Image: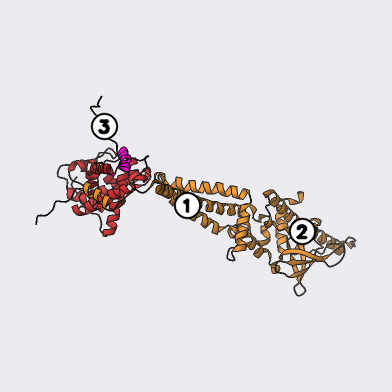
Chain colours: A red, B orange
Amino acid sequence: MEQPYALPPSDEELVKKTLVDKEQFGELIDRYEAKLTRYIARLGIRNAEDQRDVLQEIFIKVYKNLNGFDTTLSFSSWIYRIAHNEAVSWYRKSSVRPEGHLVSDSDEIFSLLASKDIRADVQFDKTINVAELNKALFSLHDKYRQVLVLRFFEHKEYDEISDILQIPIGSVGTLIHRGKKQLKAALNHEAIRI
Amino acid sequence: MAEQPPQELKQAVLERIEEERVCPKSRWFFWCQDSFIWFLWAVAVFIGAVAIAVTLFVVTHRQYALYEATHENFTTFFVEFLPYLWFAVLAGMVLMGVYNLRQTKRGYRHPLWLLVSSSVMFSFAGGALLQAFGFGYLIDHTLGQQLAIYMSQEKLEQKLWQVPAEGRLIGRRVLEETDAPATTIVFEDISGNRWVTNVTELLPRDLELLRSQKTVRLIGTITDEGNKNFHTCGAFPWLLDDNFSSRELSAERRAFLERAYEHMHRADERLLMLEKEAFAGVATTTAVPVGICANLAIMRKLGIRCEQVACHSF
């Protein structure tokens, strides 16, 4: 009897299939293209052409290193790690400081600063200055901005961030805590209306 | 001409894979890469273990027994003899070990203190094991022989003990001047100088040691530099050519202190007899030892220390 609802293959299954048939890699590209485009944009690669070049490099690297994928990790963390490294490498090659628009709407701002990780003692109104917040985020040190992006924009868990940035889980917590403090300070400094 | 729409990413990537004949790297590549990192970590831990083994050798087999003979106090002795080079090697290897652990598949997940302490612990365990089999001495000795710039403990000891002007010699007896009872012997130091050495103040144990013709250390004083005459106050075994237990080292130290006490005691006896002669008009019949050793600064210092620790009760 035919199964009415077949579950789509997991990423890990697709990796196995890709190693046998490279056409299957297209499915993985489809799954991650949008996510990674958003991610690298948040890391500061804003130009569509640059994004495309970087994404191509990311997927080619993923393909080359499929046999090195550690199955104890999630594929998502692994591909984000490659994307992260590729984006950092792109900045270095281009000798530019990352800049961009991390925040697109007030929900994300609320998610960032009034998350359950921090006491919600700050209230925002709808007139918050998005541009100022972006400026404040990009004034932070890379290591703080990177964890904040992964935690509040990519909605990654601590262990996933640890796997992506290859730092201990304890350090993830510390960086997020310090990053938020610095961001608050930067926002006050920028006289954003809170 | 109409502009072509950008190619779909999926299509572009798959075409590139096809055109450039991109292939996934083999599992072996990653296995070798991972194994190489672990191998480098093991090398770092092993070199760290060597550093620990030599450090343990230095710390546990140092010549604590006779430190007063060469240094003002224990602190100056200890500070001078700590194997700083090996400390630096250990620190370097711990850093290298931590770096390599961080490069392993899941190494980044662990906090720094865990990576550091695990590298140190493995090095320490390996070092203790190596030292248990006598490798600490062997490594230090071999490096000292092979590398002119490496200051092994043996070289350091020789540098400290081959100082005739300060009353210290290393060498061995070569032949006797007279038949028994010998009052002088010929002693050849490691620089090749031959000393006519007065042994009248030596204890039977010292004489026995000299008779064995093994390399020994002498404490005494030069009585005639031109004729190379040396008055010996104590003979001690050369400890670096074998593994000596801490018990043996303690026994050696006790013997050293006893020797000092003995010389001091003899000096007191001599003074007492001289007092009797001078004030009570009593003529002494017993021969009193010459007492050169009792006047040596080191013997005075040790004699006082010996009295403080009551070593005459040994």
Label 2 – label 3 distance at C-alpha = 96 Å
Label 3 – label 1 distance at C-alpha = 44 Å
Residue range of the region highlighted in magenta in the rendering: A7-22
Residue B40: horizontal and vertical position, in percent? 47, 52
Q: Which mark is residue B40?
A: 1
Residue topped by disc 3: A7
Q: Alpha-carbon neighbours of circle 2 within 10 Å: few (<14), some, or many (≥20)? A: many
The local secondary structure at tag 2 comes to helix
Residue topped by disc 2: B264
The local secondary structure at tag 3 comes to loop
Note whether B223 is above or below B239 in the view shown.
below
Q: Alpha-carbon neighbours of circle 3 within 10 Å: few (<14), some, or many (≥20)? A: few
Left/right placement of residue B241 relative to residue A165 reads: right
Inspect the image, locate mark 2, and give the three-letter code of the amino acid beneath it. Answer: Met
State which tag comes first along the sequence, 1 or 2: 1
Is residue A19 covered in magenta?
A: yes
